Amino acid sequence: MTTAQTDTNAATAAADHTRFAIGFDDRDRARFHALIDQVLDSNRWTEATLTARFEEAWEAWNGLPAVALGSWSGGALAALHFAGVQGETVLCPSNTFMATPLAAIRSGAEVQFVDCNREDLCMSFADFERKADQHRPRAAILVHIGGHIAFDSEQIAAYCRENDIFLLEDCAHAHGADWNGRKPGSYGDAGVYSMYATKTVSTGEGGVLVSRRPELVEHARGFRNYGKPTYEVQGLNFRMNEFTAALGLIQVERMPEIVAWKNEVARAELDPVFEGSRLELPDGMSSGLYKYIVFDWLERSTGRVYDEPCHRIMGHQVELPNSDWVAANHSCPPLYYRPATDTGENG
Ligand SMILES: Cc1ncc(COP(=O)(O)O)c(C=O)c1O
């Protein structure tokens, strides 16, 4: 074992991952303050260099061009506007946050819910195919629940390509995930991350859209800024300001370390306790571990990812047995980024 490994293990052992902490590393505090001073001095508090640097750093990790936004919503609305879903049907998993169906509804679409798999909590290809045949959707939203990549992503994406269905990946939980080198947002037409305060890396509020389609990236840039300069895209204000972008830059650069730390704690401390009941990933996949999911009810937990499936909240008369099963049969032991540092614990 190298000295570096010993240090990491010692830090892990000393950290208390069970107390809530935002995924921010105290070693970044001084750099963050310096960047904030830089923004103050620049007299450019929006639409300037920090936003561009944050987007470049995100692209370096994600492997796709990135557009910074004020929230996940801004990115989802931009992508669904590009897809032309108004008056059309959008397929959406029920086991997700209400943000997912609401983005489609606000875009003028009708939502039809799809069941999930019990194994990964994410949209099931079998039910997706059934619902796509039945409803002929213009678009679908695939949510990567909990920080791993939805197991049926490749099949769903292939079906969408063959049937001209626009595929939006809801990557709100998926920071840091990887499947044989492939990142979230690279399966569909676009992916949108949330930088909300509890996410694996956060800017308090914020979002990032990624896409390999240049015309969609251009659309999102216009959509976040009232369509400036040509006004061909009728968007609103979904800009990220320069102070937020400064934090985003620091966070995305630290993200691989945050995710590696969470995985190390999961392997060393949680896996031995929850062997047999924890969510198992396929070979070659690593999770960003926004949530550590156990198919059991634990008293000492942060609760469920979601308590009630969206089709129940919205009163849709559709049978989605796996979504109901998942809501009743899992919970999440706490796993917060808290590296022990020379100067004391984070937070
Ligand atoms: C699955 C999912 N989608 C979308 C969102 C919305 O993100 P935001 O609050 O940044 O708009 C969240 C936020 O928690 C989420 O968990």
Image: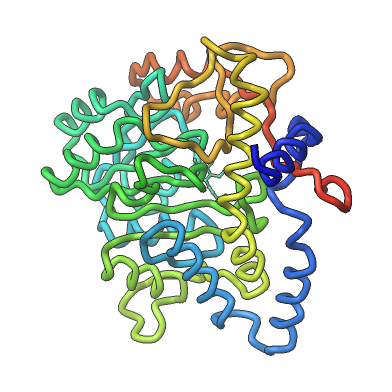
Q: Position of residue 25 (x, y in %)?
A: 73, 53
Q: Residue at x 59, y 20 (%)?
A: 271
277 on left or right of 26: left
Res 2 → quadrant: top right
Q: Nearer the viewer, residue 197 or 13?
A: 13
Instruction: Give the answer, above or below, for where 156 lies relative to 268.
Output: below
242 on left or right of 137: right
Q: Position of residue 297 (x, y in %)?
A: 62, 12
Instruction: Give the answer, above or below, for where 241 lies relative to 208.
Output: below
Q: Residue at x 47, y 70 (%)?
A: 56
Q: Position of residue 156 (x, y in %)?
A: 24, 36
Q: Residue at x 55, y 28 (%)?
A: 306
Res 294 → quadrant: top right
Q: Nearer the viewer, residue 140 or 185?
A: 185
Total numbered labels = 0
Quarter of the image where the N terminus is located: top right
246 on left or right of 62: right
Instruction: Give the answer, above or below, for where 90 lies relative to 334.
Output: below
159 on left or right of 45: left
